[in-house]
Image (spheres, rainbow, N blue to C red):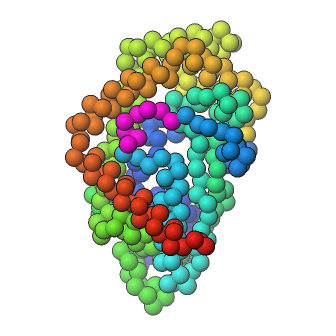
Amino acid sequence: MRTPARTLTAALILTAVVGCSAEQEAGSAGSRTSGPPTAAATKNAAEKYRPQRLPLPIYDYKFTPEENAVVDRATDIAMSSCMSRYGYSLKTTEPTITLGDRRYGVIDLYAARQYGYHVVTRGASSDVQNRRFSEDEASAMTGGLFLDAVTGEFHAIPGYSGPVTELNGERVPKGGCSAEARRELLGRESLRTHADIVSDIDTTSFARSQKVPVVAKALAEWSVCMKSEGYSYATPLESISAVNLDEPGADKSEVRLATADVECKKKVGLVKIWSAAEAEIQGEMILASRQPLQQQKQDNDTTLRNARSLIAAHPDS
């Protein structure tokens, strides 16, 4: 059962069904970025840009941006097949890939000089992400249910009094087409994962690392360096907050600020010091949760393997 005239966006539907995601860089400076695709979202940028990925152990339990794109594409294919049973067409698109590790903000000069603090991306536009679905399309995609990925249990989405079990004369799987796609990729009925543990380590280690004495010292040295360039910021997160990331691209002042930021990081060795300290914290946290993290890694491997097989079986999708 559902309320009339209900519409949802693609982003909201995927959030409702997927729940918390361990693939995002939780707690990082890069997670502050938002808004429309930037001028950096071009194949030309992707060809020239060779981004650095930080050597953090928690990344072993997360998809890379490129792997995320594979899973996203396979999910689109599986959902499109499911939606067609109810007479709806779901257009598959090239997934968006975020290029470059923004955990500590921008960390390489090429990106800073070309795009300032704006994220370099390749793939679909926000028009696809913001597409609105009709009441029945939303019901087919979600089954009127929200997935708690920690427990594997479903809950009614606000506006629905219960699960949608039938639509256009066809049975609706529990959690709709989105959940069916996840089951296909995971290779099992249960959708419970340990993504929350990955996310907690990812977020907690980032916060704790800033309090490590050597990191705090390096941050202070970075701040002094920035002051010599005419800027007054205590941390790289503050400098990011000074620009408007909702603009479609960086202006000259943003580029100058981002370039000074990266040059000062390199001068004081901030990224190397910070990542080493955080890696040590993550290592201790990973040891304390070894078994569930190993299961999460197996789930990721299974999902990626099934995703690649699905894409290979649908070359025209």
Quadrant hosting residue 159: bottom left
Q: Which residue lies furthest to the bottom in this view?
A: 169
**Relative image position of residue 42 (x, y in whole percent):** 71, 48
Quadrant holding the C terminus: bottom right
Quadrant hosting residue 193: bottom left
**Relative image position of residue 7 (x, y in whole percent):** 56, 69
Q: Which residue is nearer to you in this view: 42 or 239?
A: 42
- 54 with respect to 282 (left or right): right
Quadrant holding the N terminus: bottom left
- Residue 54 lies in the magenta-colored region: yes
269 over 8 or under it: above or below: above
Question: Which residue is found at the position 62% from the left and 38% from the top?
Answer: 50
- 137 with respect to 165 (left or right): right
Q: Which residue is nearer to you in this view: 195 or 53?
A: 53
**Relative image position of residue 251 (x, y in whole percent):** 76, 32
Q: In this picture, which residue range is highlighted in magenta?
A: 53-60
